[in-house]
Image: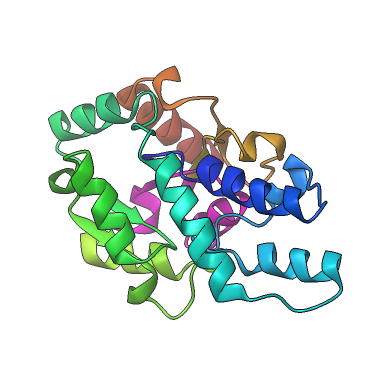
Amino acid sequence: MILDTETPLRLSWEEIYREAGLVVSPAEWATFLGTAADPPAAYDLMERHLGRSVDREALRLRCLARENELLAKETPLPGVRDLLDEAGRLRLLLAVASSSERAWVEGHLGRFALRDRFDAVVCAEDVNRTKPFPDLYVEALRRLGVAPADAIAFEDSVHGVRAAKDAGLFCIAVPNRVTRHLEFPDADLVMTSLDERLLGELIREVEARLSAAAS
């Protein structure tokens, strides 16, 4: 939810698929996302289309090189810095819970000088199972020393929302340019952008909803 990493990934795979005469709808592609930085389903689809196995490592390296070119042009999503600033003023604990590898996550946080904004960064190497399983969120909560009922998750994928909800968190979905083609029925709230609402306002709404649900 800091950077739209899904669009560069999709565009890099689109170039590969186009050469193979394969067209993948935005909705189908969006279902692959949220479980890993390098979704196995992308290769599976290619192999089903060709009717044979492919050199997955060669494709991975090609895709990664192109993805990195496109990622270099990306900047933090609208509202990210304002939300982090407000969280700092409110003295809130913050964590990243990502299915990607640590070097990749830390690299982007460092590139935008955001690493020191987070009290914990939990990545694929830190758990046995990534999203849609709740392990990343469970570990993030443990490191923060926060109960699920006192936390809010911001997610941009269906798998991410499922992971957050199964960990017991209130989850706000903010779809990116790829996942906006999907429905988010499991999310507690859906926003079009992080700059749509102030964090303090969101917290008050979450507290009101939880209070109403408990009464």
Q: Is residue 149 magenta?
A: yes
Quarter residue 32 falls in: bottom right
Q: Is residue 215 visible?
A: no
Q: Is 125 left, or right, of 44 in this rendering?
A: left
Magenta region: 145-170
Which residue is painted at 26% across and 28% down in the image? 81
Viewer-proximal residue, 135 or 102? 102
Query: Is 117 above or below relative to 128?
Result: above
Which residue is painted at 38% across and 24% down in the image? 78
Which residue is painted at 40% across and 66% down in the image? 136
Q: Is 193 left, or right, of 195 in this rendering?
A: right
Q: Is residue 123 magenta?
A: no
Quarter residue 39 falls in: bottom right
Q: Position of residue 67 (x, y in %)?
A: 47, 49
Query: Is 99 above or below relative to 51?
Result: above
Q: Position of residue 189 (x, y in %)?
A: 56, 34
* In the image, farthest residue toward the front: 19
Query: Is 45 above or below relative to 156?
Result: below
Which residue is painted at 78% across and 71% down in the image? 47
Quarter residue 121 falls in: bottom left
Q: Position of residue 99 (x, y in %)?
A: 44, 63
Q: Is 156 left, or right, of 52 in this rendering?
A: left
Q: Is residue 189 visible?
A: yes
Viewer-proximal residue, 165 or 73? 73
Q: Position of residue 196 (x, y in %)?
A: 45, 18
